[in-house]
Image (spheres, rainbow, N blue to C red):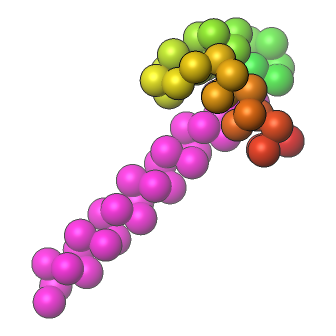
Amino acid sequence: MMGVMEKLLSEERDEGRMEGKMDTLVQLVCEGILTISDAAARLSMSEEQFRRLMDERK
């Protein structure tokens, strides 16, 4: 049973890390430190997808 709980917790941590990474990249773009193109590449997504992500997180 612990194996299942550990797997769930690991997945939750991974999701949290990805959320944090996305928030950080959006903030860096908003501050003019990083371009949309660079941020999108770091998340393996298109610039349009990143723009939508920015709109969701503002």
Residue at the (69%, 15%) spot, across then down: 36
Q: Is residue 10 magenta?
A: yes
- Quarter containing the C terminus: top right
Number of on-image labels: 0
Residue at the (34%, 62%) spot, across then down: 11
Q: Main secondary structure of the magenta part?
A: helix
23 w.r.t. 51: above or below: below
Q: Position of residue 30 (x, y in %)?
A: 82, 23
Residue 8 occupies which quadrant of the picture? bottom left
Residue at the (47%, 48%) spot, across then down: 17
Which residue, as the protein is rendered here, is positioned at the far bottom? 1
Residue 51 occupies which quadrant of the picture? top right
- In the figure, is residue 14 to the left or right of 46? left
- Quarter containing the N terminus: bottom left
12 w.r.t. 6: above or below: above
Q: Is residue 49 magenta?
A: no
Q: Position of residue 37 (x, y in %)?
A: 63, 10
- In the figure, is residue 32 to the left or right of 17? right
**Residue 28 visible in this rendered orientation of the protein:** no
In depth, the one of 10 and 49 nearer the eye is 49
Q: Position of residue 28 (x, y in %)?
A: 72, 23
**Residue 8 visible in this rendered orientation of the protein:** yes
50 w.r.t. 55: above or below: above
Residue at the (60%, 37%) spot, across then down: 22
- In the figure, is residue 49 to the left or right of 16? right
Residue bounds of the magenta highlight? 1-27
Q: Position of residue 57 (x, y in %)?
A: 78, 44
